[in-house]
Image (cartoon, helix red, strand yellow):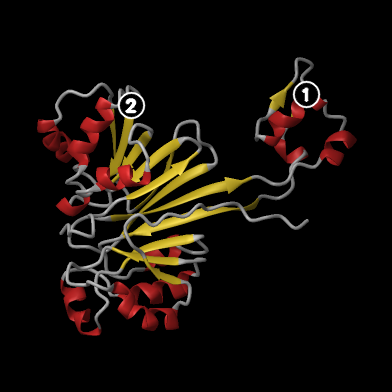
Amino acid sequence: MPLPYRYLTSLMLRYNGKGILVDCGEGTQVALRRRGWSPKPIDVILFTHFHADHISGLPGMLLTMGNAERTEPVLMIGPKGLARIVNSLRVIAPELPFEIRFLELSEREQQIDLPGEKDFHIHAFRVNHNVPCYGYAFSLDRAGRFDAARAQQQQIPLKFWSRLQKGETIETEEGTLYTPDMVLGPPRKGLKLTYTTDTRPCESIVRYAQGADLMICEGMYGEPDKAEKAREHKHMTFTEAALLAKKAGPAELWLTHYSPSLIHPEDYMDSVRRIFPASRAAKDGRTVTLAFENETK
């Protein structure tokens, strides 16, 4: 439930001028405003599941996006029933200046590639809650380093270099074919973010958080005596989230989605960090910029 010092669930990713929103709980608009961000560039909205604390802020968000004069389509992704539920919520937001397109997830694991974004991938994976619920992993590929010496050795015209570096395949009027692998080294480490909430521990989380730069995971209960309650309501304890992170090996773990009774999450972090040292009890508004690794060669 929303509290005076805590909003409901939402995650905002910003990449290449696009906005990607995961869940839209009550208070999401206020949280965006506090960061100084506009909802207008949100091109994709994903939903983990349809409990009210993850979707109750959507009608107001759509109205605000419309008032910001957005006209480009918005893609919504979520479990089966997405179109029916969103259209029911739109009773109070019936007229919008942009189209809503729906992609309902039909598989337990599914990859979504956005139009025009060949290097950016979204992976949806089922988790274990008391209604159909998905986690999401976002990955950004990074091509190999451009090798000018190889391009020169193969007498590739200079005018094609930048296009090959961007991954294009080029065929000249004379029928000569130039491909990116002719001038690029092996792929370099990209970026990966994994987000999961409202679930019991499951192996799909470990697989999709493997090697992530950031893993954001629910920690509903920090108190040791709440383990049975976590099992009953299909949620996780801090300790269970830390054990998943230990298996998956992300660079960092953020805990989120706390129980309303959990007033001071930091009080329970010592035991978490003994299991997975790079853990944080996240707070509303926490942000980070993920950047490619610096190359030493």
Q: Residue furthest top?
A: 173
Label 1 amino acid? Lys
Please report the residue visible at 29 percent of the width from the left and 73 percent of the height from the top: 265
- Check disc 2 and report the residue beneath it: 73
Give the image location of residue 116, x and y in percent: 50, 31
- Check disc 1 and report the residue beneath it: 159
Pointer 1 or 2: first along the chain? 2
Left or right side of 144 for 48: left
> In which quadrant is the N terminus drawn?
bottom left
Residue 164 occupies quadrant = top right
Residue 84 occupies quadrant = top left
Q: Secondary structure at mark 1?
A: helix
Q: Secondary structure at mark 2?
A: loop
Classify 10 Å Cα crowding around label 1: few (below 14), some (14-19), many (20 and above).
few
- Tag count in the figure? 2
Classify 10 Å Cα crowding around label 2: few (below 14), some (14-19), many (20 and above).
some
Q: Nearer the viewer, residue 276 or 136?
A: 276
Q: Residue furthest right?
A: 153
Give the image location of residue 274, x and y in percent: 44, 83
